[in-house]
Amino acid sequence: MPASVLYDNDRCLVAKILPDGTRQRATLFSGFLSHYLFRDRYGRPGKGNDKGNAEGLVGYSRRNFMVPIPRVATCDAFNAHLEEQCRRRQADVLRGQSETIGERLVRDLAAMADLPAAPFDACDQTTGRVSSQALVRYKTNDYSVPVAYGHRDVWIRGYVDEVVIGCGGEVIARHPRCYGREDMVFDPVHYLPLIERKINALDQAAPLAE
């Protein structure tokens, strides 16, 4: 890990900028800092030139790694594509430098701290209650859980690409995250016990219509 990282003032990082200019961090980001133990620094609001190198690299990456737009099935596949492009670039020598990017990276890594043994669980954590239809609402969408958990309190972890639902110490459901509104995400297996008891419910079972 680097000793410090320069950020902008995105709402997922900064809950509030106080009158003296200090930042009141968002709760999840405070946990992230405590896990990795580095110092956070911030550019001035609305002053993108405070981190001009970062802005320039974003533009470089967009032009060189994402034109034409890569076609990928998952976020992991997209990240693997970007990693491969970055590794290829390590053999390049930038103007004004005598060493390759890879050689300079080795020196930078030697100055950084080791990563923790376990990664930070970067997700939105909240709680909910299972409805009579074995659905749990997260953000603006409903996700199914096994019917045995009807009317139970559950915990929810929302990741970029997945929603995980649990009860007590047990994970009871995993779904691809939906970014629509008022959608229902079903796993038909969750409803099999109900259908076994009420075979006539088969035709009306919304999960099996998916």
Image: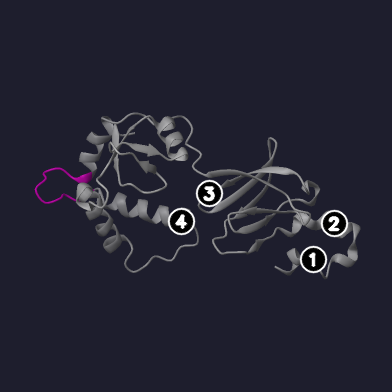
Q: How many marks?
A: 4
C-alpha span from label 3 to label 2: 29 Å
Residue 205 is labelled as 1
- Mark 3 belongs to which amino acid? Tyr
Depth-wise, is mark 4 or mark 3 nearer the camera? 3
Lateral position of residue 42 relative to residue 115, left or right: left
Q: Do the residues labelled 1 and 3 touch (CB within 8 Å)?
A: no
- Mark 2 belongs to which amino acid? Leu
Q: Do the residues labelled 1 and 2 touch (CB within 8 Å)?
A: yes
SS under mark 1: loop
Depth-wise, is mark 4 or mark 1 nearer the camera? 1
Precedes in sequence: disc 3 or disc 2: 3
Which x, y percent locates residue 109? 28, 34
Lateral position of residue 138 relative to residue 160, left or right: right
Residue 159 is labelled as 3
Q: Label 3: how many residues lie within 10 Å, few (<14), some (14-19) or many (20+)? A: some
Task: Name the residue rendered at 86%, 65% in the picture.
Answer: 201
Using the image, determine if residue 164 lies above or below residue 21: below
Residue that carries the numbered disc 2 in the rendered image: 194
C-alpha span from label 1 to label 3: 28 Å
Magenta-colored segment: predominant secondary structure: loop
The residue segment tinted magenta is: 91-101
Residue that carries the numbered disc 4 in the rendered image: 77
Which x, y percent locates residue 186? 69, 60
